[in-house]
Amino acid sequence: MGLVNKVVADEQLMDEAVRWAELLKKIPPLYIKSVKYGHYKTTDNKVRIDEREYILFTHPQEVSRDRQEGLQSFLQRREPKFTGR
């Protein structure tokens, strides 16, 4: 994946980190942002996608008033009165 650019001894680590920081300062921030976005977009795994979709779509439905109304109306054998909440 190219996550390691160079392996150095512990005593050289800070110098190498500073050298890379100086190189990165010369790259436009929006370019870095787009590269990072592309990386995260291609490495996002199915578990994280499923988790995000559950949080955004399924969970709000499960705890909604409409769900409670649907269950109550079923048990009481009446038409539900949904509100979108």
Image (spheres, rainbow, N blue to C red):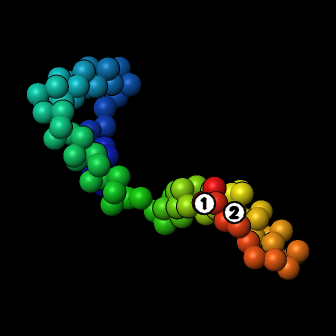
- Relative placement, left or right, of 21 versus 26 is right
| Residue drawn 71% across the image and 67% down it | 81
Question: Helix, strand or loop at disc 2?
Answer: helix
Q: Choose the circle earlier in sequence order: 2 or 1.
A: 2
Q: Of residues 55 and 45, which is closer to you in this image?
A: 55
Q: Is residue 63 visible?
A: yes
| Residue drawn 33% across the image and 24% down it | 13
Q: Quadrant of residue 72?
A: bottom right
- Relative placement, left or right, of 75 versus 46 is right
Q: Amino acid at mark 1?
A: Gly
Q: Amino acid at mark 2?
A: Asp
Residue 52 in the image, given as x and y percentages of width and height: 52, 56
Does the residue at mark 2 contact the one at mark 1 (Cβ under 8 Å)?
yes
Q: Of residues 85 and 14, which is closer to you in this image?
A: 85
| Residue drawn 11% across the image and 28% down it | 26
Assess disc 1: are there few (<14), some (14-19) or many (≥20) residues with their C-alpha within 10 Å of its C-alpha: few
Give me the disc on residue 84: 1
Residue 85 in the image, given as x and y percentages of width and height: 63, 55
Residue sitting farthest toward the bottom? 77
Q: Is residue 55 above or below residue 58?
A: above
Residue under label 2: 66
